[in-house]
Image (cartoon, grey):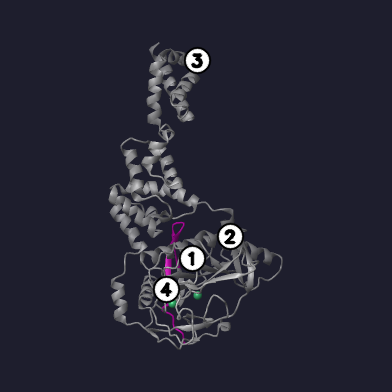
Amino acid sequence: MATKTKQEQNTDNPEVIIGLEIHVQLTALKTKLFCGCSTDYRGKPPNTYLCPICLGLPGTLPVTNAKAIEFAILVGLAFKCEIPPLSYFYRKNYYYPDMPKNFQISQYDKAGGVPIGIGGEVQFEIEGETRTIALTRIQLEEDPGRLTYLGSILTSPYTLIDYNRAGITLLEIVTEPELRSPKEARLFLQKLRSIIEHLGVANCGFEGAMRCDANVSLKGGKRVEIKNIGSFKAVQQALEREIIRQRRVRADGIEVIMETRHWDENTGRTVSLRTKEEEHDYRYFPEPDLVPIEISREWIQNLQSKMPELPDQRRQRFMKDYNIPQYDSGVLTSSKALADFFEACISLYNNPKNISNWIMSDLMRHLNELNIEIDESTVTPEEFITMLKHIDDGTISRRSAKKVLMDMIKEGKHPDRIIEEDGHHRLGDSDAIEQIINQIFEEFPKAVKDAIIDDKAINFLIGQVMKKTQGTADYSLTNEIIRSRILKLRNKHKSTF
Ligand code: ZN
Ligand code: MN
């Protein structure tokens, strides 16, 4: 069982109540939600992916992207949401520079509003137990533009606005407040992402493609919303810090106020942004420019029949087809990129157990250290398999393979290049060192005899190995091997006398 960090122990408590609101860009869509503008805005000059519709110019009319609805239904089915036959777009009114229209076209689940998916659930595993978290709803809405600040949001003298993102399709996913710890929140998000990516509707690894707001309170206290947290790790950290803050406030006899706070990754603290607006502040009303979304049962059945393999099924298949233990299969399918990597490796080298072991141990450890996903690293299945095959054919030992893999991940080099280039890597290999020691023992038989009687001569032999390898032999390994050989020779001497 995994040991818990001190912060986890402090914040993992039944009195903690966490609910999440996740915004996922459906990045597999080619065009925005209500116009034909391209979604491929990343890395492009600001305010160049625009048209009169997404700029909200007077007299323009939005038209709903049918593919966006299809993707949302797919997600809804995967999460076991109820998909109502009619759902509606609403206007969420607010005055803020990130929305050129001063309202966001969104959906609403009250006052006659019906979102695209109602209820639903996501299951994930924590410490060997299955947890089921209920969803409140999923809904479609348009992404606002992107605001950029100079330095901190609180002290920046100006704000830059890029509307390229305005109108991109977002799926908003809201959970019931059922999460009980920051770690649960992280694992929940990981599973959610894996499901969405398996559906092929989004790549959540794109910058800003998956954003999370977290609501957290202590039992009986007011709820605080932490806005726009960028990564799984940051969600866990931000929640941990915020829970500690609320505990302190409470311990001082002060009531926690309902507010929106901003997570500052640099300081590891949450800071107050504004007191929380109430829902009625948004003056929701039905969007008069768009017709209701009609979803026929046939459409749903058709999509259901095209449902791709989801992480839980893939996990079962890994257990059955590749004989991988349940826990390992769960880790391997915790991200689509990792599961894809694993299967790409198997197609090149049919040894699933060995591949899985290396992924689960060394590969995962290095990726975690760098806080990256497999598809953010440069290591390809082909390179990974090249390394494993070099162990099989004796080019490198398991021990030096670990070092080679580390360099592959950290330096982005091909394993063959690492083995060729860095002679010392090979000489960290016990087989290679052993060969050199054989040569030295043959060249200096007297020193070997001396060493059997006197430890001091051992140092001479080590020195000769270092000299021959120009200092590239692993010293402690050389020392270890020579000493154990001499010890064997000593024992042999004893037994013959
Ligand atoms: Zn547009
Ligand atoms: Mn939203």
Q: Marks 3 and 4: in contact by CB < 8 Å?
A: no
The foreground one among 315 and 472 is 472
Range shown magenta = 112-132
Q: Is mark 1 within 8 Å of ligand 2?
A: no
- Label 3 amino acid? Asp
Residue 388 in view of the camera: yes
- On the image, the x and y values in percent for residue 485 come to 42, 22
Which amino acid is tagged 4?
Gly
Task: Say whether marks 1 and 3 touch (CB < 8 Å).
Answer: no
Q: Camera-side residue: 423 or 489?
A: 423
User: Mark 2 and mark 3: span between their CA atoms?
Assistant: 60 Å
3D distance between C-alphas at marks 2 and 4: 32 Å
Mark nearest the camera among 2 and 4 is: 2
Q: Secondary structure at mark 1?
A: loop
Which residue occupies 71% across, 65% down? 252
Give me the C-alpha separation between circle 4 and circle 1: 25 Å
Q: Check whether the beta carbons of the residues at disc 4 and disc 1 lie within 8 A of each other.
A: no
Examine the rendering and report whether any part of residue 175 can be seen. Answer: no
Residue identified by numbered label 3:
454
Look at label 1 and name its amino acid: Gly
Q: Quadrant of ligand 1?
A: bottom left
Residue tagged 4: 120
Q: Residue at x 52, y 60 (%)?
A: 183
Label 4 or label 3, whichever comes before in sequence order: 4
Which numbered tag is attached to residue 208? 1
For label 2, the residue is 265
